[in-house]
Amino acid sequence: MATRKTVDKAMEILHAFSDEQAELSIAELSRRLGMHKSVVSRLVATLREWRMVEQNPTSGRLRLGVGTFELGMRFANQEPLRRVALPLLAELVKKTKQSAHVSILDGWNTLVIATVESPEALRVIMRLGDRRMLHATAAGKVLLAYHPESMIDDLARETGLPALTPTTLTDIEALRKAVARVRRQGIAWNDGESTRGAGAVAAPIFGAGGQIAAALSCVYPLAVATKAQRVTIAREVKRIAAEISVAMGAGYPAAAKPGER
């Protein structure tokens, strides 16, 4: 039991770091996690030996170490969905000139497990490991659409459907309608709901047994992609999602035309 508690505390330290706070001091970790400084110091010393955290030589603050990257890459390289998807993502980017990624469900968020960036100077970037809220993204709406309807209620209770931009769907009934539309059409849209000026279109990826496995998204600057281009992007997203689904051992259900909104 004591060993488990120690591991739990070590995991809390690792998960305290984020994109917004990539570096933290021992004192900050102690305050944030409610741990005594001596406990944090002892655990950090062990994590440093395993290269899971390191000290910035300039600031003296702690940050995630190369060991976390190595573990993440091992997972990524062993993940069959990612291996199957990457070459097809590259094909999608070549066709659309827009960035593309695959996201899975991670709690109440989407988690990017594969991504290929657009070659264009003006593009939307999604990093490997990025998390986004389900109600504010095209990928999130896809994942909601192919899970039990009760998940929307659970999501609203857990996250509160916060407004990330003026166009975020913050009303649960509006979200229900949007998700129902995804079920009918097999495609989801995001018109600046997560990030101002960034749009996206997503389609479901199914695994063996026909269960939802992930969402394939293509993201683009709203100011760049015309309506006609978005319809083309949606068609390509659905096509590539179908190919990935087949490669993962699943069929692909018939859906409405990708241009329908």
Image: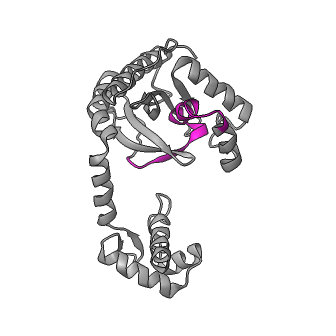
Q: Position of residue 116 (x, y in %)?
A: 32, 37
Foreground: 218 or 58?
Answer: 218
The colour scheme used to paint the residues is: one colour
Q: Position of residue 175 (x, y in %)?
A: 67, 32
Q: Write the residue at 44% across / 48% down.
A: 130
Q: Write the residue at 57% across / 23% down.
A: 182
Residue interval drawn in magenta = 128-150
Q: Which residue is farthest bottom? A: 38
Q: From the image, which quarter does the C terminus lie in?
A: top right
Q: Position of residue 23 (x, y in %)?
A: 44, 69
Give the answer, above or below, for where 116 lies relative to 5. Answer: above
Q: Write the residue at 65% across / 43% down.
A: 155
Q: Position of residue 183 (x, y in %)?
A: 57, 22
- Asked where in the image residue 161 lies, by quadrant, the reply is top right
Q: Quick check: can you spot residue 1?
A: yes
Q: Write the residue at 58% across / 73% down.
A: 32
| Residue 142 is a magenta residue | yes
Give the answer, above or below, for where 218 lies relative to 34. Answer: above
Foreground: 243 or 4?
Answer: 4
Q: Which residue is farthest top? A: 257
- Asked where in the image residue 249 lies, by quadrant, the reply is top left
